C-alpha cells in the first residue's frame, strides 16, 4: 500500500490533463482484465463474469491550476482547476505537467499590505506563479497559456498517517488496483475516471456506456476532526471507512447502504457514517445514468483535502480496502 500510494500521489494528473497518472495506472493493471480507454480518457478495466454488472469508480484527477496569461515581467497568471481555497495558496510550490518546471505562488509581502489586505483572504486573481523568469519571452520558453500545474508536495510516511497531495482520490485508485488482484463472481468494471473535480464528467460517460446494475464509488472524503465543534467533523480519522448517506449530488440507495453496514458489522470492520451533506463525488453521475443505478460511496477520511498536505490514517485505508472486498463478495451471493 505504501509504495503504491507514493507512486500514485507523486504522479501528475490535474483535471483534463490525466495522461501521466493514467499511464502509470494502466501499467499496474494491464494484466488484470480487458483494459481500454474511452473517448473522454477514463481508464476502464473489465473483469468479465456471469454475476451482477458492478462498476467500481475512483477518480484519477486532482485539483490544480491552468495558465491564463503571462505578464511582461515573466509572472504567470492562472485560474484554479477544481475547488481550491485561495487562503492556502500564497508561497506554495507548484510544478507544471508538460515541462516539469517548478515555481512558487507569489503575492506582495506582509510589510507592503494595507490593514484591509492583512485581514481578508487574498483574491486568487491577485496571485501569480513565479518561475524565476524576468521577461515574458523567457517564461514562454518553459510555460505557455493552457499549461497545467499542480502542487509540488513530498509524500511523507508519518507513522500512523500519510501526508501527500492528491490523496483525493489516489487513495481510491490504490484500492481499486488492489481489488483487481482478486477474482469475484461478478461482471466487474473498475473505472479510473477523469474530470471528477470539475463536474463528474468522466463518470457520466463511463456509466452511460457500462450501464451498471450497482455502482460503488471509492473516494477520499472531507475530514475536519481538529475543529472546535464536533458537528463540523464530517468524518474522523482512525474511525474506519466513511459510508455516505447523502451529499450534494446523490442520496445512497437504502438497500445497498444496509448491505454495506451489515457486511461491516458481520466482519467486525470499523466504520462510520459520513455526517453532513456538503461535497459530492462520482456517485452523483452514476446513480442517474440511463434508467438509474443502485449506488453508494465508501470513503477514506482525508484531512486538509484539496491542498498539498492532505493526510489519511493507514488503518482507515486498510479497513476501507477490507470493506470493499467483503461487499463485493456479498454481492456475489445475494440479490439486493
Image (spheres, rainbow, N blue to C red):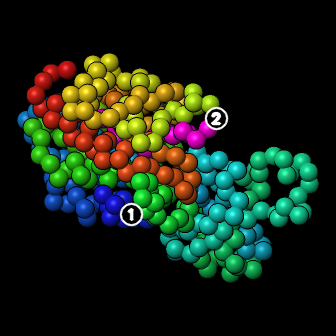
What residue sits 20% from the left and 60% below the top? Answer: 30
Residue 239 visible within the image: yes
Count of numbered marks:
2
Classify residue 313 as left or right of residue 43.
Answer: right
Left or right side of 309 for 242? left
Q: Residue at x 12, y 24 (%)?
A: 334
Q: Position of residue 73 (x, y in %)?
A: 78, 74
In the picture, residue 150 is in which quadrant?
bottom right
Whole-Å distance between the Cαs marked 1 and 2?
Answer: 32 Å
Tell me, yes or no, whether the two marked residues, 1 and 2, touch with CB atoms within 8 Å. no
Numbered badge on residue 135: none
Q: In which quarter of the image is the C terminus?
A: top left
Toward the right, the furthest residue is 114
Q: Does any portion of residue 208 appear in the rendered image?
A: no
Instruction: Please identify the residue farthest to the top as the structure is shown.
Output: 254
Q: Residue 228 carries which label?
A: 2
- Pick whichever of labels 1 and 2 is earlier in the sequence: 1
| Secondary structure type for disc 1 | helix
Q: Nearer the viewer, residue 45 or 113?
A: 113
Provide the residue designation for mark 1.
6
Q: In which quarter of the image is residue 226?
A: top right
Q: Where is residue 91 in the image (x, y as percent from the top left)?
A: 69, 64
Decide whether residue 268 is among the magenta residues.
Answer: no
Q: Between 41 and 30, which is closer to the camera in this rendering?
A: 30
In percent of the image, x 21 and y 28: which residue is there? Answer: 266
- In the image, the segment drawn in magenta is 216-227
List x then y, in percent, for residue 161. Answer: 44, 54
Magenta stretch containing residue 218, yes or no? yes
Amino acid at each position: 500500500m505504501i509504495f503504491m500510494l507514493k507512486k500514485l500521489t507523486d504522479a501528475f494528473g490535474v483535471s483534463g490533463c490525466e495522461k501521466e497518472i493514467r499511464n502509470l495506472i494502466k501499467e499496474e493493471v494491464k494484466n488484470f482484465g480487458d483494459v481500454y480507454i474511452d473517448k473522454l480518457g477514463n481508464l476502464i478495466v473489465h473483469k468479465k463474469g456471469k454475476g451482477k454488472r458492478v462498476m467500481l469508480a475512483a477518480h484519477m484527477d486532482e485539483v490544480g491550476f491552468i495558465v491564463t496569461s503571462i505578464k511582461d515581467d515573466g509572472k504567470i497568471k492562472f485560474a484554479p482547476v477544481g475547488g481550491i481555497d485561495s487562503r492556502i495558496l500564497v508561497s506554495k510550490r507548484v510544478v507544471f505537467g508538460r515541462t516539469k518546471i517548478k515555481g512558487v505562488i507569489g503575492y506582495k509581502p506582509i510589510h507592503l499590505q494595507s490593514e484591509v489586505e492583512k485581514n481578508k483572504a487574498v483574491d486568487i486573481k491577485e496571485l501569480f506563479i513565479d518561475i524565476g523568469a524576468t521577461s515574458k519571452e523567457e517564461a514562454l520558453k518553459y510555460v505557455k497559456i493552457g499549461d497545467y500545474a499542480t502542487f509540488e508536495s513530498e509524500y511523507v510516511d508519518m507513522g500512523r498517517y500519510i501526508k501527500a497531495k492528491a490523496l483525493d482520490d489516489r487513495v481510491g485508485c490504490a484500492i481499486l488496483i488492489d481489488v483487481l488482484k482478486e477474482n469475484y463472481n461478478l461482471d466487474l468494471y473498475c473505472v479510473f475516471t477523469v474530470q471528477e473535480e470539475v463536474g463528474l464528467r468522466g463518470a457520466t460517460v463511463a456509466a452511460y456506456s457500462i450501464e451498471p446494475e450497482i455502482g460503488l464509488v471509492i473516494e477520499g472524503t472531507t475530514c475536519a476532526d481538529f475543529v472546535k465543534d464536533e458537528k463540523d467533523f464530517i468524518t474522523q480519522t482512525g474511525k474506519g471507512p466513511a459510508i455516505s448517506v447523502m451529499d450534494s449530488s446523490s442520496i445512497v440507495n437504502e438497500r445497498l447502504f444496509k448491505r454495506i453496514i451489515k457486511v461491516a458489522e458481520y466482519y467486525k470492520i470499523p466504520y462510520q457514517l459520513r455526517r453532513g451533506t456538503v461535497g459530492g463525488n462520482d456517485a452523483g453521475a452514476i446513480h442517474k445514468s440511463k434508467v438509474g443505478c443502485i449506488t453508494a460511496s465508501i470513503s477514506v477520511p482525508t484531512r486538509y483535502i484539496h491542498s498539498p498536505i492532505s493526510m489519511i490514517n493507514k488503518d482507515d485505508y486498510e479497513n476501507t480496502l477490507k470493506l470493499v472486498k467483503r461487499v463485493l463478495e456479498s454481492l456475489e451471493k445475494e440479490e439486493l
